[in-house]
């Protein structure tokens, strides 16, 4: 835990804080169909053209049901489209490596994965997919699934801010505007920046290079180096918290994340939109203190996770130290030297706080407690900044539950920003919290006692349990990062993980939209000294406590058999699994 | 009244509650409370395990865990039964007042028939004479009588009930002391006010309030979450080659699901209604009590609520060229026939100007005009001289000319100071102004101040003009006022506030208050009021004290706070229980996790048993809090939240660590496992 780590951490938080307000204000304009932005002269005509071609009436607002139906229909079409592209990639262009069609279970898993903004990768990108599959079949989802998450979050905010309203916005307008005004323009500049750092962007066939130093005991004298349009995909995978790497090694690969600077910017870009959205929340509900309180809760949980992962990784592995590895080096297994302990620990925390899932180190090689951090981050519901939009709506569900649980203590029935929280809202919120828990624990338990589940494990014992828990937490949380060490490219894993991803996305979006619709319909009471305070220290403590108690207590029994036992075994015995 | 205060733990009531608690084990009634139902199912499962000797634990351990699981269910049932029992005791006392009476029924042909009270139906007419008990709820259609209503109000002073107007309602079971009245029956047997009251208190009709329903949903969701966590834990155990017995898994489940609040939730609700009854207020539903906590606009009638009912004459302000004695003399004459408290206070004040007391009897030639709402004047005609006293505009119309300037100024000054000016005129000559002063009740200003801190707006409703209203509003410290209010203004004020999302509470007694009472979220009808008013409101104040609205709000808030405090406490408890049970379950397979046993509990068995015992006993320990309610403090929401979070949140984290440790010491000391 050196000073350079502290400086980087302070710098990271400071820059994030500084960007939150301007991004939040810009987001609020983009998300207002009539909002003016500086890009209007260039993009407005395109926007109008799209509406005209696709027959969208931008003035027609949708009820929550119409909004939900639009999302589901759109996603279903996208899912089938990607499935078709993957199955037929041998017949489609831009396939210089001549890859064959993708297996049905893998195609389903991959299509579900990208549709749901999870970007879980059962496949190895450069060894399975053609350029066309990557650029058309997958990158398309990177944009629209991120836009969809933001749209749902904003629909919920509109519900909270509304007063006896019947509608929560128009999904098609939100989708178009978020892409045109937000994601595409940023990605153009962001890709160019990445190229400047050394990220590749081409359509060339893979390069074969002579190795300088042949690996002992191998006959290979050459190495295949993958090429492709990496920069354009890396930009949106971070900004849209998708996380699906072009390369199998994801952000650990020098072609995707070459320098410490690109590493810093990539981490920042993961949190950029989720962080800005907290400001947008405060602005739209006209309570900026609330927006900042939510931001602070998220930031505190990021810092806590970073600190835990960093200190555990920096302390290293005692078994290795008995073999002569210096304790000062920490646990460098599975980490890139150019990122080091801190750069890897912070990245792991951020990518799992947000449901990004890009990785720059092997999470499987983290110490037990270091690996517990990303695992728990995902199990908390991907609400610590979380996915683009998805993090905020997940967090707002926790806010609703917090207000409901503690709101009674001020002697009134619970009220959130002037909206009464009633049975329907509690039901919707409870379902949204319950779904990922059900699918994570349910499928992990099934895998743990099934031959197909155990067959995929790299490690026996508690670490194997962590691998299974991690996979389903990542899928149901729509994170997409892998502990690795689990061979999940089997029909059983592909199918169950695919189902978990779809459930973790749409079975949450629907109740969240129902919540938005119900809140919109209610009268909004003006807040007074008697209203539940949703800003300030007490609320921050309360919200943090609720997330930790509901989230952590649920997974504590399972975790105690995984990382917890592993940790004590590592330090307290000489047992190996 | 009825509401003799029962001590919390009256031995007779406890015995009754124990029996009821056992009866409530019936799964059909348990299923209404999902958390406790799961607990009961868990207890059944461990009982089967015990009988068929499943699992490897010692019998003594399984037996004790099973017993304590059953105790957990019983303690929750006991809490509910105890709360209900307190209501039942009150209802029984009420029932004593309901005696079988014979009624004199007036038939269509004008003849009378002796009818049993049970046979009276809505619309029947009965004659009730002095000494008789009124056989049913009804409305006086003819006559006036003094009625002893102590049976329901506890107030020994008789009240006057008369046909027409706002004091025409009579309640079955009360006794006519003088005169006789004709009453139209307004309630069928079994539907009377008294019946309604008994049912309410007994809780027979009790339905879950909206917030209780929502809370039950959330508690059920938490229960499902923990059910999933524990069931999958079994599978993860199989993977890890650790066997968890069913008894231990059930013990863990019951400790984690929110049994504390689940067990006490209905007792808290019943106790809330009960506390209102002790204040002599009957809530027609639990929903009304909940709404009372949410109220953020209080409409308070000026007269009787903010000011003492009667205004007092405090000063005579003569017109130019009139001496004060002449004014006092005329004022007294004009007030002789005015039986209102104001009129009497004028006569009393006039005596201070050396006038002897006069009575109507002394003046056979005089023609007295009593005060009426139409003329808004009273007075006397002595020969040709017409002496009048009344509201400025009424008198102005009477004399058909403007007032002299200094009279106009005096009247305005009186108004500005919150008084009511009455103008005295003799013939067409204005003699001067009487200053009637409203006396604001003591202690209200502080109370309203505290309400403001809690975000509750107080609005004074008065028929006075704006100037007077503003002055009194300022003196009383209310936030706003509605002057020159007519009943329909009240209604539209309520609608406007509600449209802005506010919840409104008001009191009322007259028939013309009925629409507003029905519209308000909390409408407290005065028991002295008309039947229409009582039916429109959702609470009835037996003492007919409008100031009580404030206490009603406090009781509603107290109930909600209690619910929130115990929910927070219950959930915060889970942390300590985890640290007791999880290490105990794993330590035999993984001895290395010993350090997780933070509390240093004696053995795995004693740790699990202690957590289960704590979980059961905490319900019993919190019954007094659930029934009495957490202490009400009129503070702003932020302060209140911080305070309660510290007590019940931080307390909820800490208490079980201490409690489980102490029980563990005891369990090991006694060698129970």
Image (spheres, coloured by chain):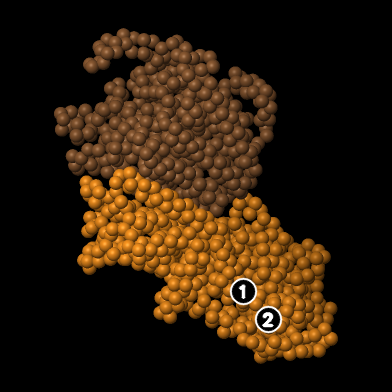
Other residues around mark 2 within 10 Å, as few (<14) / some (14–19) / many (≥20)? many
Find out whether the residues at labels 2 and 1 contact each other: C-beta distance under 8 Å.
no
State which chain is coloured brown: A
Q: Which residue is mark 2?
A: B136
State which chain is coloured orange: B
Residue A358 figure quarter: top left
Q: Residue at x 40, y 79 (%)?
A: B11
Q: Position of residue B151 (x, y in %)?
A: 59, 82
Tag 2, which chain? B
Query: Is there any visible trace of residue B276 in the rendered image?
Result: no
Q: Residue at x 50, y 30 (%)?
A: A108
Pick the front one: B530 or B405:
B530
Q: Disc 2 to disc 1, how far (Cα)?
A: 13 Å
Q: Is residue A363 left or right of residue B541?
A: left
Pick the front one: B423 or A419:
A419
Quadrant in which the N terminus of chain B appears: bottom right
Tag 1, which chain? B
Pick the front one: A321 or B381:
A321
**Sequence-earlier tag: 2 or 1:** 2
Q: Is residue A318 left or right of residue A360?
A: left
Vertical position of residue A484 compared to residue B631: above or below: above
Other residues around mark 1 within 10 Å, as few (<14) / some (14–19) / many (≥20)? some
Q: Which residue is mark 1?
A: B196
Vertical position of residue B655 compared to residue B337: above or below: above
- Residue farthest top in this picture: A210
Query: Is there any visible trace of residue A441 in the rendered image?
Result: yes
Q: Residue at x 46, y 28 (%)?
A: A106
Q: Position of residue A146 (x, y in %)?
A: 51, 30
């Amino acid at each position: 835990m050196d000073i350079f780590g502290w400086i980087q951490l302070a710098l990271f938080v400071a820059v994030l804080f500084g960007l939150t307000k301007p991004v939040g204000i810009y987001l609020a304009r983009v998300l207002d169909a009539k909002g003016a932005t500086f890009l209007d002269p260039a993009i407005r005509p395109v926007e109008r053209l799209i509406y005209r071609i696709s027959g969208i009436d931008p003035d027609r607002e949708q009820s929550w049901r119409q909004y939900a139906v639009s999302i589901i229909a759109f996603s279903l079409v996208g899912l089938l489209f990607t499935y078709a592209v993957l199955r037929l990639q041998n017949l489609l262009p831009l396939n210089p490596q001549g890859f064959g069609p993708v297996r049905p279970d893998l195609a389903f898993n991959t299509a579900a994965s990208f549709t749901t903004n999870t970007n879980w990768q059962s496949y190895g990108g450069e060894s399975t997919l053609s350029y066309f599959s990557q650029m058309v079949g997958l990158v398309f989802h990177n944009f629209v699934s991120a836009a969809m998450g933001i749209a749902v979050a904003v629909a919920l905010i509109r519900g909270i801010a509304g007063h006896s309203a019947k509608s929560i916005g128009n999904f098609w307008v939100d989708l178009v505007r978020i892409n045109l005004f937000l994601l595409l323009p940023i990605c153009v500049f962001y890709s160019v920046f990445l190229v400047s750092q050394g990220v590749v962007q081409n359509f060339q066939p893979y390069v074969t290079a002579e190795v300088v130093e042949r690996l002992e005991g191998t006959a290979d004298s050459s190495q295949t180096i993958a090429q492709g349009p990496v920069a354009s995909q890396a930009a949106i995978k971070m900004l849209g918290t998708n996380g699906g790497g072009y390369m199998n090694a994801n952000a650990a690969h020098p072609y995707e994340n070459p320098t410490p600077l690109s590493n810093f910017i990539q981490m920042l870009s993961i949190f950029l939109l989720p962080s800005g959205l907290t400001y947008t929340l405060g602005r739209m509900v006209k309570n900026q203190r609330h927006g900042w309180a939510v931001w602070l809760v998220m930031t505190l949980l990021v810092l806590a996770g970073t600190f835990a992962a960093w200190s555990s990784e920096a302390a290293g592995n005692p078994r290795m130290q008995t073999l002569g590895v210096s304790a000062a080096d920490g646990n460098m297994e599975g980490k890139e030297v150019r990122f080091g302990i801190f750069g890897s620990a912070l990245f792991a925390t951020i990518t799992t706080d947000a449901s990004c899932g890009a990785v720059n180190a092997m999470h499987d090689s983290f110490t037990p407690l270091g690996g517990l951090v990303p695992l728990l981050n995902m199990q908390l519901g991907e609400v610590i900044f979380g996915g683009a939009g998805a993090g905020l709506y997940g967090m707002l569900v926790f806010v609703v539950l917090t207000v409901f649980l503690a709101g009674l203590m001020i002697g009134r029935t619970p009220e959130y920003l002037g909206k009464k929280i009633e049975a329907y809202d509690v039901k919707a919120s409870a379902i949204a919290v319950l779904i990922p828990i059900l699918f994570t624990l349910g499928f992990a338990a099934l895998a743990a006692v099934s031959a197909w589940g155990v067959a995929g494990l790299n490690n026996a014992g508690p670490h194997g349990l962590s691998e299974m828990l991690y996979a389903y937490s990542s899928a149901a949380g729509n994170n997409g990062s892998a502990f690795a060490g689990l061979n999940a490219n089997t029909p059983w894993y592909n199918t169950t993980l695919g189902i978990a991803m779809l459930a973790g996305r749409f079975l949450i979006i629907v109740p969240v939209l129902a919540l938005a619709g119900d809140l919109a319909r209610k009268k909004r009471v003006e807040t007074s000294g008697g209203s539940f305070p949703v800003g300030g220290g007490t609320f921050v403590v309360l919200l943090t406590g609720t997330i930790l108690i509901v989230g952590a207590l649920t997974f504590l029994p399972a975790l105690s058999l995984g990382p917890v036992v592993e940790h004590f075994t590592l330090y307290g015995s000489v047992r190996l699994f | 009244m009825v509401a003799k205060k029962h001590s919390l733990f009256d031995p007779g009531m406890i015995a009754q509650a124990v029996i009821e608690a056992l009866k409530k084990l019936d799964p059909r009634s348990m299923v209404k409370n999902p958390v406790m139902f799961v607990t009961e199912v868990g207890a059944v499962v461990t009982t089967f395990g015990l009988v068929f000797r499943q699992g490897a634990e010692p019998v003594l351990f399984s037996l004790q865990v099973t017993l304590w699981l059953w105790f957990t269910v019983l303690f929750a049932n006991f809490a509910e039964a105890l709360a209900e029992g307190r209501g039942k005791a009150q209802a029984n006392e009420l029932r004593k007042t309901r005696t079988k009476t014979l009624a004199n029924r007036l038939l269509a042909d004008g003849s009378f028939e002796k009818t049993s009270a049970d046979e009276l139906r809505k619309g029947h007419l009965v004659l009730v004479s002095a000494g008789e008990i009124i056989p049913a709820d009804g409305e006086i259609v003819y006559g006036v009588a003094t009625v002893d209503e102590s049976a329901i109000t506890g107030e020994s002073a008789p009240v006057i009930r008369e046909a027409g107007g706002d004091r025409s309602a009579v309640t079955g079971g009360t006794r006519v002391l003088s005169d006789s009245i004709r009453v139209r029956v307004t309630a069928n047997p079994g539907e009377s006010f008294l019946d309604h009251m008994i049912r309410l208190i007994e809780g027979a009709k009790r339905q879950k309030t909206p917030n209780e329903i929502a809370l039950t949903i959330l508690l059920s969701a938490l229960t499902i979450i923990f059910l999933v966590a524990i069931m999958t834990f079994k599978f993860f155990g199989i993977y890890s080659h650790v066997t968890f017995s069913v008894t231990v898994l059930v013990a863990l489940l019951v400790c984690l699901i929110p049994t504390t609040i689940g067990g006490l939730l209905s007792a808290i609700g019943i106790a809330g209604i009960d506390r209102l009854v002790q204040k002599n207020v009957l809530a027609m539903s639990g929903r009304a009590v909940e709404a009372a906590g949410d109220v953020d606009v209080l409409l308070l009638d000026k007269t009787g609520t903010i000011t003492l009912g009667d205004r007092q004459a405090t000063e005579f302000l003569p017109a130019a060229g009139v001496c004060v004695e002449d004014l006092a003399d005329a004022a007294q004459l004009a007030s002789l026939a005015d039986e209102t408290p104001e009129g009497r206070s004028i006569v009393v004040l006039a005596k201070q100007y050396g006038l002897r007391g006069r009575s109507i009897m002394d003046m056979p030639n005089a023609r007295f005009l009593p005060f009426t709402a139409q003329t808004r004047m009273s007075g006397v005609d002595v020969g040709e001289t017409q002496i009048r006293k009344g509201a400025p505009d009424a008198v102005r119309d009477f004399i058909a000319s403007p007032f002299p300037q200094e009279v106009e100024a005096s009247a305005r000054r009186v108004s500005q100071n919150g008084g009511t000016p009455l103008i005295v005129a003799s013939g067409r000559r204005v003699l001067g102004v009487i200053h009637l002063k409203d006396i604001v009740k003591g202690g209200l200003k502080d109370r309203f101040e505290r309400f403001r801190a809690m975000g509750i707006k107080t609005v004074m409703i008065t028929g006075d003009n704006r100037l007077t209203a503003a002055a009194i509003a300022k003196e009383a410290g209310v936030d706003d006022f509605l002057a020159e209010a007519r009943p329909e203004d009240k209604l539209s004020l309520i609608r406007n506030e509600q449209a802005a999302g506010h919840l409104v509470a008001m009191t009322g007694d007259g028939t013309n208050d009925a629409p507003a009472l029905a519209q308000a979220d909390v409408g407290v009808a005065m028991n002295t009021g008309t039947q229409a008013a009582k039916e429109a409101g959702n609470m009835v104040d037996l003492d007919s004290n409008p100031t009580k609205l404030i206490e009603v709000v406090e009781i509603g808030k107290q109930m909600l706070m209690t619910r929130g405090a115990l929910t927070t406490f219950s959930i915060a408890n889970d942390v300590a229980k985890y640290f007791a049970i999880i290490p105990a379950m794993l330590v035999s397979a993984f001895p290395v996790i010993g350090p997780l046993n933070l509390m240093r509990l004696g053995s795995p068995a004693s740790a699990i048993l202690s957590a289960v015992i704590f979980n059961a006993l905490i319900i019993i320990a919190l019954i007094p809090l659930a029934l009495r309610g957490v202490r009400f403090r009129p503070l702003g929401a932020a302060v209140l939240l911080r305070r309660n979070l510290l007590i019940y949140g931080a307390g909820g984290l800490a208490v079980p660590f201490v409690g489980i440790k102490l029980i563990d010491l005891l369990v090991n000391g006694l060698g129970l496992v």
